[in-house]
Amino acid sequence: MAFQDEDVYALTDKGNAELKSAGTSLSAAELQVLVLIDGKATVAQIAQAARNLAPAAVNEIMRKLFSGTLITTATEPSSDGLESGFFSIAVPAGFFSNSAAQPDPEVDQGVSTLKQKGYYVRIARRPAAAREVKQGEQLTVLVVDDDPDLLKLLRTYIKMEGFAVRTAEKRDDIIAAFRQPPRPDLVLLDVQLPDANGFDVLAKMRLHPLLKAVPVIMLTAEATREAVLRGLQAGADGYVTKPFEPDHVVAAVKAVLGLSGAAQSKAAESKPK
């Protein structure tokens, strides 16, 4: 299991008991890291606080603590409906209307732009004004795709622009990523997943009180009218076609979030280390 800098972990009941125990089998370094895990600090912050330990050592210790069920991914209360409840959300009949044959200028423009540029941002859902990213603020992008190589590529390029990045390959990963604070500022969502349909995930997001306003850009291999129409009906904020240029993805992300140029990069660069 890979521990990313932006990930947040919390103690399990077993972990809390270990801290309170009079005797422990953990080393001094392992106890030091365990004490720092509070459900709020990121992996990067924990590594910074444990100044006497190398980041690689902190990562290895956290891996051991995780495998020993002393820590787990930080989550919010299950009342948020983001555990088992999310994928049980019923999408109303007619949510995706059968109007593919009817004229729709927005859909036609989307298809045309997709074929020309490789990405399309829905003008009607773009922020009216450029977003101001505060000094030290870092926006979070969740990338959902079942291709590990593609996830690695997107993580690299998006992180280079100053964003925090989470990834998910299947349903359980998606739920875990949604429940991990802070909630994503934007989701890059593949249409075809091994155990879910991207359009269905998008529809359920738009019906969920905590996720309905989160911008979503669909990743699709099909720049067809039907695919674009289905995404727009479900509330997609944009499209990126596969195969794509990483720069197109970054441009779409910034456009949907209302970021100008290197605004996010500059803010992230000034974030305290």
Image (spheres, rainbow, N blue to C red):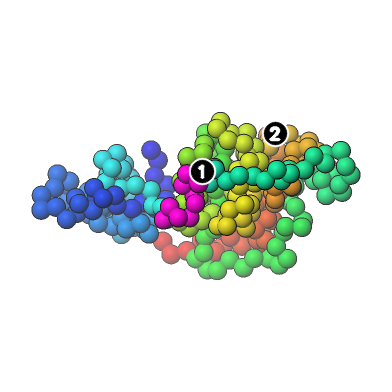
Instruction: Say whether residue 200 is left or right of residue 134.
Output: right
Residue 100, horizontal then vertical, whole percent: 82, 39
Residue 80, horizontal then vertical, whole percent: 48, 55
Residue 126 visible within the image: yes
Residue under the image location 58 percent in, 66 percent down = 133
- Residue 27 higher or lower than 127, as above or below: above
Residue 202, horizontal then vertical, whole percent: 63, 46
Foreground pick, 151 / 260: 151
Foreground pick, 151 / 195: 195
Residue under the image location 51 percent in, 38 percent down = 171
Foreground pick, 85 / 110: 85
Graded by Cα atoms within 10 Å as few (under 14), some (14 to 19) or many (20 or more), the crowding at tag 1 reads many
Calculate the distance from the C-alpha at mark 1 to the C-alpha at mark 2: 21 Å
Q: Label 1, on which residue?
A: 174
Graded by Cα atoms within 10 Å as few (under 14), some (14 to 19) or many (20 or more), the crowding at tag 2 reads some
Residue under the image location 85 percent in, 44 percent down = 108
Write the start and end of the magenta stretch as one range.
77-85
Q: Label 2, on which residue?
A: 221
Q: Main secondary structure of the magenta part?
A: loop
- Residue 6 higher or lower than 242, as above or below: below
| Mark 2 residue type | Ala
Residue 172, horizontal then vertical, whole percent: 47, 40
The quadrant of the image that shows the N terminus is: top left
The quadrant of the image that shows the C terminus is: bottom left
Residue 36: name its quadrant. Answer: bottom left
Label 1 secondary element? helix
Instruction: Say whether residue 74 is left or right of residue 80.
Output: left
Residue under the image location 55 percent in, 32 percent down = 195
